[in-house]
Amino acid sequence: MDSVSKVLFLSEYLKPASVVFDLKAKDKVQALDELCDVLAKQKHIANKKLILTRLIDRERLETTGIGDHVALPHARVDTGGEVAVAVGRSEKGIDFESADNKKVHLIILVVWNPSIPGLFNHLFAGLAKFLRRPEFRHRAFQAKDKADLYKVLSEIELMLPLLDMTVSRASLIKRLQEIEIKRNKATREQKKALEKESAHLREELDQALLARFDRLMQRYGFAVADVAEGACQGCNINVATGMSAAIEGSNDIYICENCGKFLVAARAAKPVKKKKK
Ligand SMILES: [Zn+2]
């Protein structure tokens, strides 16, 4: 975990043959299937069926549409290699149930190996940061052909693995809490499904965050508290005004200075909010 400071470009992981300039897919599942096919044909992935299932499971947790016509579906599976990336462009657009309701024209699918824990944040943060820049998105959307699109995407610079860059964290940790609470009252059969979902969610969250989450769950029976009307619902103490404003409508996780629980906005945060300038 010490050599992560080197600068990498997406071209390290994305091969020209893994770019589909004109997806045939008409919906989300078809698109995931089509991109997995591309990876399987090039032997970047070994078990297509398993990976497709994981990708679909992940979409069920929460859409990976990050808004502005872009989606970043991903799954953590042993790929045999480090990372497998496929890119699909859809002229007509595909419904990904993105928060902004915009159809997705660019899909960057990432399958990565669980033996490299920092890698996902590293990759995902770089992709999301780059793709949220309008001028870059336009270049990608206006690419004339496959080679052109590949060239634009190759320039994506992947950054350091920032622990707090995981997308959709607040809604995911809230969901994890719901599942952990349900698990305690579940029948044996229900437990299996809940444990599976818990494991998926945990793959998306940072280790240090999870350790803290588990400690709080053990001690109090819950770890995540809503902020409502400026107060932490875990301890009923008002949080600082600036903090309360920052939490409102954000998907970031804060910590209550009084009771130490994770603070999230009372209303379910959207996966990724477009920042107003
Ligand atoms: Zn509190």
Image (cartoon, rainbow, N blue to C red):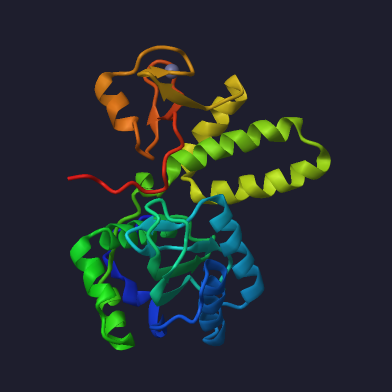
| In-image side of 228 versus 147 (left or right) | right
Question: Which quadrant: the C terminus?
Answer: top left
Q: What number of labels is visible?
A: 0
Question: Which quadrant: the N terminus?
Answer: bottom left
Q: Report the residue at 40% width, 49% height from top.
A: 167
Image quadrant where residue 46 sits: bottom right
Place of residue 207 in the rendered image (x, y in percent of width and height, measured from the top left)? 49, 43
Q: Nearer the viewer, residue 71 or 74?
A: 71
| In-image side of 112 versus 244 (left or right) | right
Residue 116 appears in view: yes
Q: Nearer the viewer, residue 70 or 200?
A: 70
Is 238 placed above or below 73 here?
A: above
Q: Nearer the viewer, residue 46 or 52?
A: 52
Residue 210 appears in view: no
Place of residue 272 in the rendered image (x, y in percent of width and height, measured from the top left)? 37, 48
- Furthest residue toward right: 188
Q: Report the residue at 48% width, 25% height from top.
A: 225
Place of residue 32 in the rendered image (x, y in percent of width and height, measured from the top left)? 53, 71
Place of residue 190 in the rendered image (x, y in percent of width and height, measured from the top left)? 77, 42
Q: Report the residue at 22% width, 44% height from top.
A: 276
Is 57 placed above or below 258 here?
A: below
Is 258 placed above or below 109 here?
A: above
Question: Quadrant location of ligand 1?
Answer: top left
